[in-house]
Image (spheres, rainbow, N blue to C red):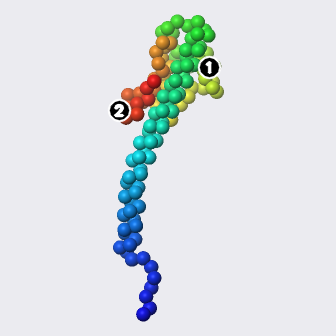
Amino acid sequence: MNRKRGFTLVEIMIVVAIIGLLAAIAIPSFVKARAESQSKACINNLRIMDSAKEQAAMGQGWADATAIGSGSANETNVLAYVKGNTLPTCPANGTYAWNAIGTDPTCTLGTATSNPHTL
């Protein structure tokens, strides 16, 4: 008897089905963990921004409700309290707003239904 060695089509299909099942279980968990990680990093950036804003307000003697506009002189003063003197970026591609003194900075993804980016 001269029999060739190898895998049958059924054996290969079973292996492919098992790999597909494992991928179906792992991919949603990976996506969820990634979204949670991005949300936590964004919240940390908002904390850094809030701290810098409050430090600048104390240093400059600003009152509550003083506006911190994008590109303004006030923003330049606040950025002096942020490492690298640059506005952090949201890892999920949201956009940050400083808001006035006494109010928390915000991210455009702050209203997301899952993993909102709010301080």
Residue 90, above or below 50: below
Is there CB contact under 8 Å for labels 1 and 2?
A: no
Q: Secondary structure at mark 2?
A: loop
Residue at the image point whose x is 48% and y is 36% from the top:
38
User: Is residue 108 visible to the viewer in this orientation of the structure?
Assistant: no
Secondary structure under tag 1 reads loop
Callout 1 amino acid? Tyr
Foreground residue among 68 and 19: 19
**Residue sitting at x 37%, y 58%:** 21
Please report the residue visible at 41 percent of the width from the left and 55 percent of the height from the top.
Answer: 23
Residue bearing mark 1: 81
Q: Quadrant of the C terminus?
A: top left
Residue 113, percent from left and from top: 35, 32
**Farthest residue, direction bottom:** 1
Residue type at mark 2 is Thr
Badge 1 or badge 2: first in the primary sequence: 1
How many numbered discs, if any?
Answer: 2
Residue 45 screen position, x and y as percent? 53, 28
Figure check: 54 above or below 25: above
Q: Position of residue 15 (x, y in %)?
A: 40, 67
Task: Report crowding for label 2: few under 14, some 14 to 19, many 20 or more residues within 10 A (C-alpha).
Answer: few
For image coordinates 41% across by 50% down, the residue present is: 27
Quarter where residue 87 is shown: top right
Q: CA distance from mark 1 to mark 2?
A: 32 Å
Q: Nearer the viewer, residue 73 or 32?
A: 32
Give above or below for 101 relative to 40.
Answer: above
Mark 2 lies on residue: 113
Q: Which mark is residue 67?
A: none
